[in-house]
Image (tube, helix red, strand yellow):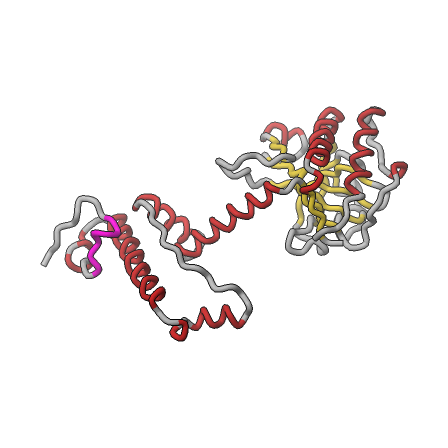
Amino acid sequence: MVRAVPARLSRKNIPVSGYFGGYHRGNASERKLYLLLLSFRIRENVMANARNKTPSTSTARDSGARRSGAPKKVAITLRLDPDRARRLQILAETENRTLTNYVETALIRDLSLREEAARAITILAAPGTSSIIAPDDVVRGAEESDAAFARRRDLAVDLWSIPDNG
Amino acid sequence: MVPGAFVRVYFPTHEKPRKPGLLHIGYILANSPLEAMVAYTTSQPWPTGTPLSAGVRLFTAEEAKRLNQSRPFVLRLDVLAKLPMNPQWFPEIEKEGEGVIAVVPSRLQEELTDLATNLVRRRRDLIQMRGI
């Protein structure tokens, strides 16, 4: 039996058993979209089942995470329009990642950028470096004016004196 | 090594601030005969749609070319490293030229000093020192 392909595929109208019933007749991008939406639907069902499980039925990965002391991850549901989801899937494949891992990494990157933006300066100090610089030790540039050098020397003294808080 | 120079340096990472990291081009903000305060540079473009952090200076392809660099780059005056001046951190320091790629003109050096000074003065409480 050949099923009619809906005008717009979405996660809600994708039939789980429909692939060999006609969807494979579409072009390559349609087939890819179908598989992507199908994977969302299956994952959603798995996640829904997992939420209803008691702690004793947790997966090996969960217990491994607890053994290593890492906090247990929280599952969230993400709703994306098909076009964005397809583009993300392609990006994930180019980095040899799963879509879930790609989305997680992108969110972690965003968080770290925001945290970094909230700091004014990060100074990475090598072992053995001093916590003070004498103004006379600051090296002067060949063409630097007195005023410019004075400003830069003050900056150097200031930067060197910042205590370690890392 | 002169202040205002772009040099080759094993810039440490946030994760391992005590160890030399990958080879990068760094900017010598200030130095004594023994140590240098180096600012991080990267040729990775600043992410589209992300506000420019205070202390970030973008260099166009034309500016980069004038500084003997082949690609546009980002100078991060908000990511600094305090490093001893030795070959462990500056691999070419004992070679001729000391690994210096270019020295900025005095006007640009002043601009960068002012950018860093304003950053330190306005947001001193948000400075993070790591690694000692």
**If the image is split into quadrants, where does the N terminus of chain A sit?**
bottom left
Residue with the most extreme bottom position: A56
Chief SS of the magenta region:
loop
Nearer the observer, B110 or A159: A159
Residue B71 appearing in the image:
no
Residue with the most extreme right position: A136
Nearer the observer, B64 or A136: A136
Range of magenta residues: A10-16
Report the residue at 17% width, 44% height from top: A7
User: Residue A56: x percent and y percent?
Assistant: 40, 75
Residue B42 appearing in the image:
yes
Report the residue at 83% width, 49% height from top: A130
User: Residue B39: x percent and y percent?
Assistant: 70, 40
Report the residue at 74% width, 31% height from top: B113
Q: Quadrant of residue A2?
A: bottom left
Q: Quadrant of residue A142?
A: top right
